[in-house]
Image: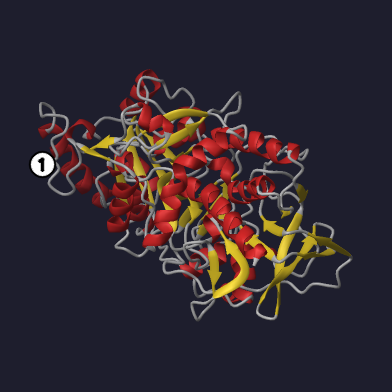
Amino acid sequence: MEKTIKGLSRRSFLAGAGILTAGVAGAALTGCGAKPKSSESTAATEAGSATPNSASAKDFWAIPELGKPAETLQADICIVGAGGTGTAAAIQAIDLGLKPLIIERLAGYGGSFIGTEGMTGLETHFTEAEGGTIWNGEKYDVKTAMSTCLNYHHWIPQHKLYENFFGQTAETIEWLESHSIVFEGNISIGAGPKVWHVYNKGDNASPGGYFMQCFGAEAQKLGVEARFETFGRKLIIENGKVSGLLAETAKGDVIKVEAPVVIIGTGGYANNSEMLYGVSETKNENIQALGMNCRDGDGLKMAKDAGAEFAEGLGTVMWCGPVPVGAITAEWTTDAYSAGVQPTLWLNEKGERYCKEDLWLDDFAGAGICVRNQQKTFVLFTENDMLTWEKSGPYGQVFSFGTPGTPLAKARAVLEKCEACHVGATLEEVTKAAGLDAAAVKTTVDTYNNYCAAAANADGEDVSIDKEFGKRAKYLHKVAEGPFWLCEVADGFYTTCGGIKVNEKTQVLDTKDQVIPGLYAGGSDAGGLYGDSYDVKYAPGSQAAWAVNSGRLAVKDAQEYLKA
């Protein structure tokens, strides 16, 4: 019998953190909302456990059987999904004089995009007002970013796709501003280039939530037709090209959409545990999706059913590292989250270190992959660390919300309530409570404390003292005096990045590398943008930027397709 944490097995797919934001269609975007009455298994839409070889994994591509359509709708472009990709596509369609129709499973606009804070922008009016982006002593423009990211991803992405994507980011920032979106400006993440364009968040706790409130309201104002609480199910292919879509309402009624163009933008498969464990290299027994709990791979299923190919790296996931188990149940931009990712002492199931813990501050995606590759993961720190955070804030910056100098006033109360967080007077007490080998942990701590002692008077940037991993001296804090905190952590992730194979125009390709006429994919449903990891160090917010830009690219090409 596996040990459980609050009802979740050790092979746990923790429920996604639904960030609260008002849905402009009249409902709060707090979760999946209504589920359809079709024969589809609910295993793919609810938190559960799965491994690549489990019986349920064999069915994760299944499409539910549908009855006869009760209603028929017409549009120039049918867009599946009302997140960043779908809403951008719909507004772009209106701009070009086309008639879009959105099919969205939630009760309003938002989707997984509400979990974003900013997007990559290159050569924008923000960066140019500062004389251009200078990074590592050189100008960081579209060409430099393309070259840097292509090298980082080992040239797996298409060069032409990057040209179209990166080359449009500046114009997209201005386009968004013309459609009610306000940006605070451009900043960097860690030591990366200053190309992350963060959104104004108004009075909302979530920048992405406020973005989608404004963007959804803009779509509504422009007259975009949308069917909410309706699920895209099956593409209609006639004479080798798209002719529409079959959708299903929450009540189980089938709708036929007649449209010569369909754009898939359902947000990937982050909440489909069977699919994620089935197609990725995930080893950690605890993983947690951050964002809306409605990304079930609907778009990928439809595309596969229609004969589409998947891009290299279908299992690529935007891992983001430690999330204290049980601490994040709604909004993830919290003090408890910030505490969990601090460069304390990170341990695996063997009681050993497995990376330089300050890696997260510069490259959370890399840190996330390190966490992914362990069976179990923990963070160990002391009461002195907690007191420091409560007085002076985190040791390192956590995105736009966890700032050194700003106290983490709420971390203690949240973590103390977590069954997976153990607080004790001695190291042996907390290691036994967590199920770790006390002797192994003590050996690791003793070695680590020797590094910390040697770092006391060293330059803060010195990486030579930590002989194992090269952690910077300023982050080497002794784990010597109790009380001790030992928290089991899941590997968090923001979205999946692997998906449908598209060309530089975001047209979907089949298994013979031929275009499926009229079919497009964008955002987290479209693969081929990354290698095995998110390029946060070089293009922070690239996935958010891709979501909006891919939606726009798809509609621009669709306009030409419809003219032919």
Q: Residue 40 occupies which quadrant of the picture?
A: bottom right
Total numbered circles: 1
User: 404 or 426, which is in the foreground?
Assistant: 404
Q: Does residue 401 appear in the picture of this structure?
A: no
Asked if residue 169 lies left or right of residue 515, the reply is left
In the rendered image, which quarter contains the C terminus?
Answer: bottom right
Q: Is residue 427 above or below residue 151?
A: above
Q: Does residue 97 appear in the picture of this structure?
A: yes
Local secondary structure at mark 1: loop
Q: Residue furthest front?
A: 564
Near mark 1 (Cα within 10 A), the count class, few <14, some 14-19 or many ≥20, is some
Query: At 29% across and 53% down in the image, what residue appears?
Result: 147
Figure coloring: secondary structure
User: 448 or 231, which is in the foreground?
Assistant: 231
Query: At 59% across and 78% down in the image, what residue appears?
Result: 307
User: 143 or 250, which is in the foreground?
Assistant: 143
Asked if residue 355 lies left or right of residue 197, the reply is left
Please provide percent x and percent y for residue 48. 59, 60
Amino acid tagged 1: Ser
Please provide percent x and percent y for residue 447. 16, 44
Please provide percent x and percent y for residue 562. 67, 63
Residue at which label 1 appears: 464
Please provide percent x and percent y for residue 14. 55, 52
Q: Residue 312 occupies which quadrant of the picture?
A: bottom left
Q: Is residue 390 above or below residue 56?
A: above
